[in-house]
Amino acid sequence: MSLHKERTDILIIGTGLAAVTTALHVPGTLSVLLVSKGGVTESNSDLAQGGIASSYLEETSEAHKEDTMFASNMTSCSARVDILVEEGRQSIEEMERFGVRFDLEEGEYALGREGAHRAHRIFHAGGDETGRHVMRQLRQSLSDNVKMLEHVLVHDLVMKEGRVVGAMAFHKEEVLHIEAGAVVLATGGIGGLIDWTSNAHTVTGDGLVLANRCGAKLTHLQRIQFHPTLLATDEPHLVTEALRGAGATLVDEEGNHVMAHHPLGSLAPRDEVAWVLTEQAGPIYLDTTTVKRLRDRFPKLALTCDKLGIDCHRIPVRPGLHFHMGGIEVDDMGRTGVDGLYAVGEVADTGVHGTNRLASNSLLECWVFGKRVARALQLHDSSFTSSETMAYDIKPDDFRTLRHQIGKWLTISPSLEEMKCFLQNTQSLTLTKHVTRQLSEQTLQLDAARLLAQSILEMERYDEHDLSTRTAAELFD
């Protein structure tokens, strides 16, 4: 197996909005290498539908902060939310300077509204394909000092004298050593660990494992959000919350509004809606009969429904794994507790989301804190010394069995016994020095799932309530 070496000032692991934002704001005198585990567009940012929340057109950011705090059941860090919503006021104008064009109606911004927002403040581009449009334009805006490399699996960070100085990886099947003056983790969340998810399949918690191995602190890993509306079909497809903001309601088989008891109705916070839908005995539908110009405003959804033979006026939905609020502990500039290592986006626990993220605050977080990471980066020259790596020696069939088991406990109402069984099964795995890309990828996924299971079980030890009777907010608090 051949060895290839790269040298860069800044290594950014990821190619989604958090990664690209950081790269856009790094001084042009520095070399930047962005690496993607799959194709460059295989990120959750590219899949984002609803849009970007911002109080750009409001007199102040106070109402946006209040909605963010309310959605999190007051568990978000107030000071960090101040940063998010106040600096986020400029995000729309800043993205437009990079060529992003947000949707307009009669010359005015076509603002949407989503769950737990009391105002229309969601900016979108291309209807329900905001992520694809925004990411395409921003990637085209990257300067010549930025290089992107696809199909790179980073399986270990390299440390020297307590500082991260690079990474060991596979470029396709070729061994790759990357020496860097600073490393930024922008690897996304954990949703790809199971099949029933809105996430890209490449988003499997790699950043958590890499950070943990080099001593960075992980916080609130048990805070996991389930989106209420994925298409209830064989393959999961996200149904944007903006559809409910446009007037769609969640109904049962008889047409009864299942969220009628809540003051915000079908636009209640995600955790509350997801839990109600999970408890429903029969099928749940989105009644879209009152949504105007559905096909124009939600072209991706309309096309998907047409392909699957679904009536766009009565869309079957069910909850699915969506977002990870916990992650790597960072300060307000994205610095971890390890010298030379930074984290941004969903992999980082900035404190802005608490136990439940407010809709469309995720892309805003990527932009606001990506800019901050770019300002905070400090580079140090250090020689690269590769270390011995190991991986679980596990056959593909055995790995698929364990991954299926992850799907049985990584749910809105997790089984503690399934978790314990998974931990026992993975504890007995043997390690090998004959590391391949496949073994490395499998090891990262199993280690990420182990971290999640251990965190959930640790929190359970201190909770006196029965697991099955708690609300989603309490469950992941």
Image (tube, rainbow, N blue to C red):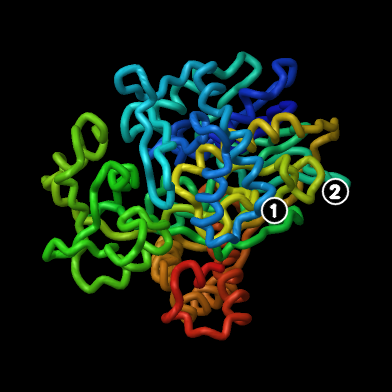
Q: In the rendered structure, which amino acid carries the disc numbered 1?
A: Glu
Judged left or right of residue 54, residue 462 is right
**Circle 2: element type:** loop
Question: Marks 1 and 2: which is nearer the front?
Answer: 1
On the rendered structure, is 328 left or right of 152?
Answer: right
Q: Name the residue located 43 percent from the left edge and 61 percent from the top edge.
A: 271
In the image, residue 112 lies at what x, y percent? Answer: 36, 37
> Which residue occupies 55% across, 70% down?
453
Which of 347/383 is in front? 347
Q: Earlier in the sequence, mark 1 or mark 2?
A: 2
Kindly identify which residue carries mark 1. Answer: 329
Q: Which mark is residue 15?
A: none
Snapshot quadrant of residue 373: top right
The amino acid at mark 2 is: Gly
Residue drawn 69% across and 34% down?
372
Q: Residue at x 31, y 31 (%)?
A: 127
Q: Secondary structure at mark 1?
A: strand
The x, y position of residue 315, in whole percent, is 18, 51
| Rendered image quadrant of residue 462 | bottom right
On screen, residue 460 versus residue 288, left or right, reads: right
Q: Position of residue 89 (x, y in %)?
A: 57, 31
Return the residue found at the far front. Answer: 59
User: Within 10 Å of the Cα at label 2, are there few (<14), some (14-19), or many (20+) other Cα atoms?
Assistant: few
Q: Is residue 3 above or below residue 75?
A: above
> Badge 1, how many Cα within 10 Å: few under 14, some, many 20+?
many
Residue carrying label 2: 162
Q: Nearer the viewer, residue 158 or 228?
A: 228
- State the residue in front, 117 or 418: 117
Question: In the rendered view of the protein, which quadrant contains the C terminus?
Answer: bottom right
Distance between the Cα atoms at labels 1 and 2? 17 Å
